[in-house]
Image (tube, helix red, strand yellow):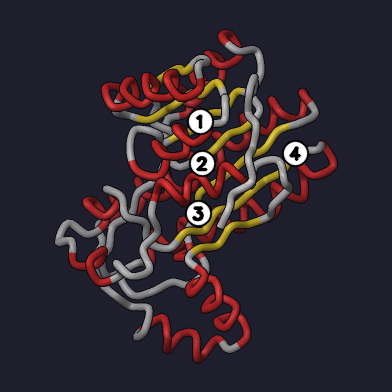
Amino acid sequence: MKLMKTDLTGQTVLVTGASSGLGEQLALAAAAQGANVVVAARRHDRLTAVADQCRILSQAQALAIKCDISKVGDVDHVFTTIEDVFGRLDVVINAAGFGYMAAATAIDQALVTKMFHVNTLGVMYVSQRAAQVMVKAGHGEIVNIASMAGKIATPKSSVYAATKAALIAYDNALRLELKPAGINVLTVNPGPIKTDFFKTADPSGNYLASVDRIALNSVKFAALIISKLGHNRREINRPWVMSAANLGYQAAPKLGDFLAGTVFNFK
């Protein structure tokens, strides 16, 4: 499939969760299209390396800012710095997040709280700050990386699925609120991706091995997402087999429960 070229020359793109995985690839893909890229995450050493790569690709500016999006002060610092350095913000991509596979009856409540603070509340606050800037400017796009888990929950993903389902619902409302201001909200719902995500979510490595046939390539998927910027897309759902399964789930919930608990349960 040939991807559409998205010229981001002169635009400022913020990517959270950019120190590794899909976030890193999204930052590099945006830089390859000429953007000034701001990368934010907790691991500053990794961020600095990503920013260096972005400058080479874009021949433009790249800025690394240490940030834990679950902390309001960190997020405020990111937006203040962007205003001071660039004076504009065109695209925000929230790729920060983590998961952990465990039975709902066994998962530690501290981990539940942390997952919601990062995956949902942190992304919501970054989106709110971005929306405030973009409404004043009269343009912009917010891209939030949710998950197919938010549409098709499976055993041992109850908390992670809940954080992403909440984010999908938030995006659906935010999209309607911001449309009159000329701002698009794009929700990206990937299935499993071949990244370090599963080092935390499933340290055994068994899950990623079991879904290898349908797991997404992070480089190609990042390029796809960047190619859709500026086209007023509502959602991107991949892989196709899981996207189709979601449609079936909505039409036949009982069958969907059966499939989610058997065919799509790789844990």
Q: In this view, does 131 lie to the left or right of 22?
A: right
Mark 4 highlights which residue?
183
Q: Which of marks 1 and 3 is nearer the N terminus?
A: 1
The number of numbered discs placed on residues in the rendered structure image is 4
Give the residue number, with chain letter if any, for mark 3: 146
Q: Name the residue under label 2.
A: 123
Q: Quadrant where the N terminus lies?
A: bottom right
Q: Mark 1 is on which residue type?
A: Ala
Question: Which residue type carries mark 2?
Answer: Val
Q: Could you say whether the residue bearing mark 3 is in a helix, strand or loop?
A: loop
Q: Position of residue 42 (x, y in %)?
A: 33, 29
Q: Earlier in the sequence, mark 1 or mark 4?
A: 1
- How far apart marks 4 and 2 lie (CA) works out to 17 Å
Report the residue at 49% width, 26% height from top.
75
Q: Which is closer to the viewer, label 2 or label 3? A: 3
Quadrant of the image containing the C terminus: bottom left
